[in-house]
Image: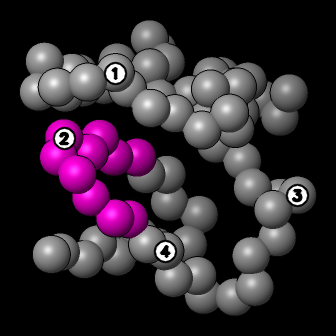
């Protein structure tokens, strides 16, 4: 088991490569209508995810499948 502190307004992402439970604790009430993000495989960011370590298909939430690229996020589109 591990913990990770993510500062306010700090972008973050993760890849789970074994059966896991991920829980969040927020500093204040969660307002889903303001929840936003950047698509995990944005080529402009170029994160080299170790997808070869994933035994099965990658599972993404519908929200995460439809996120914008960083340029759109930065430009407020």
Cα–Cα gap, marks 1 and 4: 23 Å
In the rendered image, the quadrant that contains the C terminus is top right
Can you identify the residue that label 3 sits on?
Answer: 33
Of the numbered discs in the image, which one, if any, rests on residue 19?
A: none
Can you identify the residue that label 2 sits on?
Answer: 17
Cα–Cα gap, marks 1 and 3: 28 Å
Q: Mark 1 or 4 closer to N-term?
A: 4
Residue at (44%, 32%) from the top-left corner? 59
Instruction: Tell whether position 15 is magenta.
Output: yes
Instruction: Tell whether position 7 is magenta.
Output: no
Note whether 7 is above or below 43 in the view shown: below
Cα–Cα gap, marks 3 and 2: 29 Å
Cα–Cα gap, marks 2 and 4: 18 Å
Of 3 and 53, nearer the camera is: 53
Q: Mark 3 or 4 closer to N-term?
A: 4
Q: Nearer the viewer, mark 1 or mark 4?
A: 1
The segment highlighted magenta reads 13-22
Chief SS of the magenta region: loop
Note whether 43 is above or below 11 in the view shown: above
Of the numbered discs in the image, which one, if any, rests on residue 57?
A: 1
């Amino acid at each position: 088991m591990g913990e990770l502190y993510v500062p306010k307004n700090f972008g973050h992402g993760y890849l789970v490569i074994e059966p896991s439970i991920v829980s969040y604790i927020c500093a204040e009430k969660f307002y889903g209508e303001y929840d936003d993000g950047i698509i995990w495989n944005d080529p402009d960011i170029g994160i080299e995810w170790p997808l070869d370590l994933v035994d099965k298909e990658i599972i993404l939430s519908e929200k995460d499948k439809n996120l914008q690229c960083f340029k759109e996020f930065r430009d407020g589109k």
